[in-house]
Image (cartoon, helix red, strand yellow):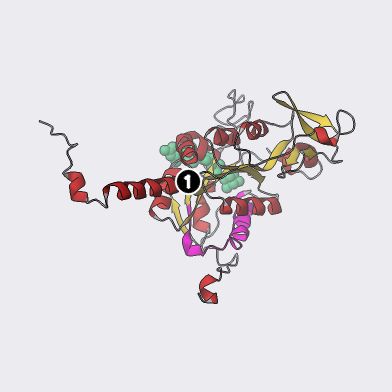
């Protein structure tokens, strides 16, 4: 094989930028995610004509217009379904879904869950701003209790969905969280998602400057974030805090915040293992919510299981091996037909 046949394509962020004018509000967190996505994709070794972005409806769902790749702006909540068909029909495409908390967890919650349980090789980026941005600020399934909006003027009384807990309940094989303004972390997580074989689910905390400004300030403000964010690292103890003196210990089935040197030694802390096939620990991490706990960012779970495509290909190959190639006419004329009289 010649060297040129094996060389990986070299892309610049400019190659990945479309000629469309970006129409998000000034200061929207979506700008950073777009910029980091382009950076991440320059390193994954996939030509841009082999990448496709699929979205539903929402501000976040304008994303495909701004990428110089294939893109599909589809119907509200249905991006996972389009992405599944696209990927199954085009096994050499790298397929990304970009969705919002309303699009992916409210109208499209069902579709998201079924993509995850099937483990189709698609990467889902859920931009979580805890609000409906495009429709001008109604509360969403991830809004905190007490969130005041036009549709909840005296505060929402609903329990918010935890996106990562939902993904783990659907047995997702790659589950991660990152933050729009944490640029290096965001790039690294996008690269990990790109490399994962199977459905990757990434929740990105995204600031909606206009309708929910500062909702993740505890996790983004440099003066306080160390106390509220725990960076997960595979094989490392769970430590956080400005002085790196706090950690997470397991007390029976409950995680608890402890002070190192006062409540316990460093060896008593939980060690992060993203490869556990049993998702209970990842589930506990996904349920840690500010202010009681630091919120985790990083990869909660990364396991390899057969993808939907692999299972489908094997099933077809087994059927051909057992019964021969078969013909469509034989299928139509098969005995299992009914006559409606
Ligand atoms: C069938 C249908 N129902 C409702 C709407 C109105 N609608 C458009 S976008 C949206 C939610 C957007 O919120 P989110 O997914 O969180 O995205 P964001 O705009 O915050 O990025 C809704 C309810 C629609 N376009 N179509
Ligand atoms: S409404 Fe919010 S999410 Fe939508 S573009 Fe503006 S800042 Fe971004």
Residue positioned 54% across, 42% down in the render: 100
Secondary structure mostly seen in magenta is: helix
| Residue 262 colored in magenta in the image | no
**Quarter of the rendering containing residue 202:** top right
205, 193: nearer the viewer: 193
The residue to which callout 1 is attached is 307
327, 285: nearer the viewer: 327
Can residue 138 be seen in this snapshot? no
x, y percent for residue 287: 65, 30
> As drawn, is 243 to the left or to the right of 293?
right
> As drawn, is 220 to the left or to the right of 32?
right
Secondary structure at badge 1 equals loop
x, y percent for residue 129: 61, 40
Span shown in magenta: 30-53
Question: The C terminus lies in which quarter of the figure?
Answer: top left
31, 123: nearer the viewer: 123
Disc 1 crowd rating (10 Å Cα; few below 14, some 14-19, many 20+) is some
Residue positioned 52% across, 63% down in the render: 18
Position of 158 relative to 100 (above/below): above
x, y percent for residue 7: 56, 71
Can residue 196 be seen in this snapshot? yes
| Residue 42 colored in magenta in the image | yes
x, y percent for residue 215: 68, 37
Residue positioned 53% across, 58% down in the render: 66
């Amino acid at each position: 094989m010649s060297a040129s046949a094996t060389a990986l394509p070299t892309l610049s962020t400019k190659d990945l930028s479309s000629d469309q004018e970006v129409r998000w509000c000034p200061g929207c967190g979506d700008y950073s995610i777009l910029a980091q996505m382009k950076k991440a994709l320059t390193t994954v070794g996939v030509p841009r004509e082999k990448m496709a972005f699929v979205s539903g409806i929402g501000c976040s769902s304008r994303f495909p217009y701004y990428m110089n790749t294939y893109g599909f702006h589809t119907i509200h909540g249905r991006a996972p379904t389009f992405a599944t068909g696209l990927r199954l029909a085009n096994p050499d495409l790298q397929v990304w879904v970009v969705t919002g908390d309303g699009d992916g967890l409210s109208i499209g919650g069902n579709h998201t869950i079924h993509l995850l349980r099937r483990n189709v090789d698609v990467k889902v980026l859920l931009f979580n701003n805890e609000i409906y941005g495009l429709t001008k600020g109604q509360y969403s399934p991830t809004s905190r209790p007490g969130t005041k909006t036009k549709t909840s003027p005296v505060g929402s009384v609903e329990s918010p969905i935890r996106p990562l807990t939902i993904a783990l309940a659907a047995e997702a094989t790659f589950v991660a969280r990152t933050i729009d303004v944490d640029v290096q972390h965001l790039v690294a997580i996008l690269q990990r998602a790109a490399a994962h074989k199977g459905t990757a689910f990434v929740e990105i905390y995204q600031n909606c400057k206009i309708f929910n400004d500062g909702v993740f300030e505890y996790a983004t403000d440099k003066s306080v974030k160390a106390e509220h964010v725990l960076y997960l690292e595979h094989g490392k103890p769970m430590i956080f805090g400005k002085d790196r003196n706090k950690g997470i210990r397991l007390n029976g089935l409950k995680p608890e915040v402890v002070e190192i040197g006062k409540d316990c030694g460093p060896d008593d802390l939980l060690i992060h293992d993203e490869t556990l096939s049993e998702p209970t620990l990842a589930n506990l991490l996904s349920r840690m919510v500010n202010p009681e706990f630091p919120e985790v960012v990083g990869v909660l779970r990364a396991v390899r299981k057969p993808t939907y495509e692999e299972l489908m290909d094997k099933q077809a190959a087994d059927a051909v091996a057992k019964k021969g190639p078969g013909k469509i006419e034989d299928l139509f004329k098969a005995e299992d037909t009914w006559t409606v009289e």
